[in-house]
């Protein structure tokens, strides 16, 4: 086995994320909706990579008694609402190396329902 072969799930996810980021870039016209999920929480940011600024953000931190899937839906709706308030309607989705399913998919679907286009 090569020394370069990833040995942990985190290494594999980081490799997928680097590969995705090679093709996904947020601009002023179409910023990037970046998703990160930990074991407990979900985070989402709308980022302009040209200037390196976060335009809108939402997180599931805050002690709500919802299930993790419901928290992800809530975060998706909140980040979409914050982005639309700043005049952003179209984004590029960055799943952060995570598989598109479960909480990541729930967040994306909720953001679409709230008005973001991607």
Image (spheres, helix red, strand yellow):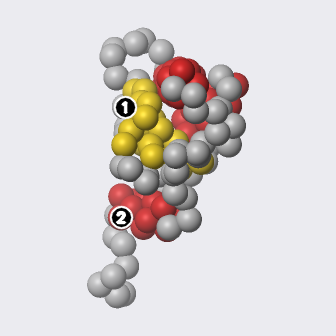
Q: Is residue 73 visible?
A: no
Image quarter in which the N terminus is found:
bottom left
Of pointers 1 and 2, the one earlier in the residue sequence: 2
Of residues 60 and 31, the one nearer the viewer is: 31
At x 37%, y 31%, the residue is: 40
Image quarter in which the C terminus is found:
top right
Disc 2, SS: helix
Disc 1, SS: loop
Residue 19 coordinates in the image, percent (x, y): 49, 68
Q: Is residue 23 visible?
A: yes
Q: Residue at label 2?
A: 11
Q: Residues within 10 Å of mark 1 (few under 14, many from 20)?
A: few
Which residue is situated farthest in the bottom direction here? 2
Label placed on residue 40: 1
At x 52%, y 57%, the residue is: 25
Residue 29 coordinates in the image, percent (x, y): 58, 45
* Horizontal relation, residue 24 to residue 44: left or right: right
Residue 2 coordinates in the image, percent (x, y): 34, 87
Which residue is situated farthest in the left direction here? 3
Q: Residues within 10 Å of mark 2 (few under 14, many from 20)?
A: few
Say if 84 sits above or below 20 in the image.
Answer: above
Say if 116 sits above or below 52 in the image.
Answer: above
Of residues 116 and 110, the one nearer the viewer is: 116
Q: Quadrant of residue 54?
A: top left
């Amino acid at each position: 086995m090569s020394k370069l072969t990833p040995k942990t799930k985190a290494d594999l996810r980081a490799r997928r994320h680097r590969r995705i980021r090679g093709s996904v870039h947020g601009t002023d016209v179409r910023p990037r909706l970046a998703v990160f999920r930990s074991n407990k929480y979900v985070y989402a940011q709308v980022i302009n990579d040209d200037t390196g600024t976060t335009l809108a953000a939402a997180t599931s931190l805050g002690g709500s008694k919802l299930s993790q899937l419901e928290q992800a839906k809530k975060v998706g709706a909140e980040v979409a609402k914050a982005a639309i308030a700043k005049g952003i309607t179209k984004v590029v989705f960055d799943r952060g190396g995570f598989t598109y399913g479960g909480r990541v998919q729930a967040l994306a679907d909720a953001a679409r329902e709230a008005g973001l286009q991607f």
